[in-house]
Image (cartoon, rainbow, N blue to C red):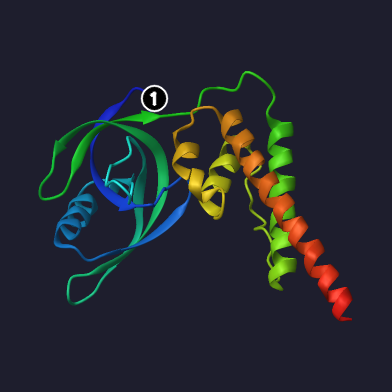
Amino acid sequence: MSDFSVRELPLFPLPDVVLFPQQLLPLHIFESRYRMLLQTVLETDKRFGIVRINPDNGEMAEIGCCAEVLQHQTTEDGRSYIVTLGQQRFRVLNITRETPFRSALVSWMEDEPPQDDIQPLAADVQTALKDVVDLSAKLLGHNTVLPDDLPDLPRELSFWVGGHLGGAVADHQQQLLELTSTGERLQLEFELLDHTRRQLAARTVLKDTFKDLEG
């Protein structure tokens, strides 16, 4: 699909939800307008746009991510439970209609080809990610491990990190989605993960110190 292709896309604005490419997102559809949206997309190509709404001011972001319906189940009272998968990102050009649900003309977005070798940066992100998971597991007493199918490719890894991490990363999700440089996205993720890693390491030292004192 061309970077410059434009199409009309039904929109599903959600407070504080940012969808990334290749991320699974389950949704519960119960409002009548979104029931109509779901019915429409199931009759066409099963795609609609997820766009973040700022809960503080109600403003809709200009950049969102296309979601494809993978599974859907409708109850007797008309509510639906669906599982969607993030596809390509898009920029909202203009709203084409507001009722019965919002639709917009959108253009697809892709990352620019990297000018430098960003594999070492991706490796740093993977290391920081593993450290954060290991330290969190130690602090919480949980046996948490990273999935075996963690993406190796820098762009896919940057999207995975953006879509799966909470905490400090979650506050920057919209910013991460909007970046069109894989290197810049990885760099920001590394800084966020490294900051979290340092905080967790300090808390781990404190926990071990108190444990020694109690012992």
- Tell me where residue 205 appears, x and y as whole percent: 81, 62
Q: Is residue 74 left or right of residue 171?
A: left
Total numbered badges shown on the rendered structure = 1
Identity of the residue drawn at 53% across and 42% down: 159
Q: Is residue 200 left or right of residue 6?
A: right
**Which of 151 and 184 lies nearest the eye of the viewer?**
184
Residue 130 visible somewhere in the drawing: no
**Circle 1 sits on which residue?**
3
Relative to 184, residue 76 above or below: below
Q: Residue furthest bottom?
A: 215
Identity of the residue drawn at 66% across and 40% down: 190
Q: Residue furthest top?
A: 115
Residue at disc 1, secondary structure: loop
- Tell me where residue 98 appears, x and y as whole percent: 13, 43
Relative to 28, residue 106 above or below: above
Identity of the residue drawn at 57% across and 50% down: 168
**Which of 145 and 2 lies nearest the eye of the viewer?**
145
- Tell me where residue 141 appears, x and y as whole percent: 71, 73
Residue 136 visible somewhere in the drawing: yes
